[in-house]
Image (cartoon, helix red, strand yellow):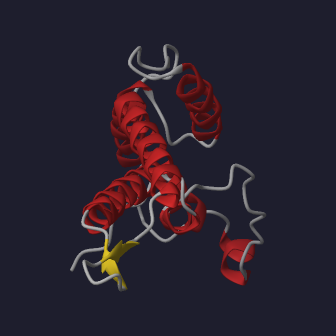
Amino acid sequence: MARPRQPIDLLVLKGKKNLTKTEIKERQMQENALKGPTENIKPPSYLTASQKKEFIEIAEKLVAIDIFSELDVDSLARYLDSKYQYLQLVKDMRKIKSTDVVEQENGRKITVANEDYPKLARVKNTLFNECRAAATDLGLTITSRLKLVIPDPTPAVHTPSEFEQKFGDI
């Protein structure tokens, strides 16, 4: 299985690839074309006021680490929508008991499972999975951020080898 493609800046910093200057320039142009613009990032109109506020906060942080553009606006909006639906469902489920006490004709009380609770639990699980998948795609979880390869902008100090000291940069 092939490894995921790494950004050209990272490859240059590592010094592991023998690429010509034209190849490096071509790769940089390809990567810049794929990033997308970041000038007009606005929350979609279908989000609530609190969702729009959170959208702006998250978008600013993602733009700062250079992993978010206008192309990702809808993904972040869907993440926030799923998150807020999930949180509302959790609040509602706390008010509902998973079992009910029912009195029989003879006066005995028995505990019966609430029929709606398992359905709500399945919806809760679905919403959680949607949130987790969207958060991973957007780089909002620690594991997804660790998988991102962001090159260090400070160049590494290169100490010339003995060969380079004798013969220079050939």
Instruction: Work out whether 81 lies above or below 154.
Output: above
Instruction: Work out whether 65 lies above or below 69.
Output: below
- Residue 170 locus on image (x, y percent): 56, 64
- Residue 104 locus on image (x, y percent): 28, 79
Give whichever of 102, 159 is nearer the camera: 102
Give whichever of 92, 164 is nearer the camera: 92
Work out whether residue 170 can be spotted: no
Instruction: Work out whether 121 lies above or below 113.
Output: above
Instruction: Work out whether 122 lies above or below 65.
Output: below
Viewed as shown, does residue 58 lie left or right of 11?
Answer: right
x 41%, y 53%: residue = 131
Query: Residue 113, located in which quarter of the rendered image?
Result: bottom left
- Residue 123 locus on image (x, y percent): 29, 57
Viewed as shown, does residue 163 lie left or right of 83?
Answer: right
Viewed as shown, does residue 106 lie left or right of 135?
Answer: left
Split into 4 quadrants, where in the image is the N terminus? Answer: bottom left
x 34%, y 35%: residue = 34
Residue that sits furthest to the left in the current view: 1
x 67%, y 55%: residue = 152
x 43%, y 67%: residue = 17
Work out whether residue 83 can be spotted: yes
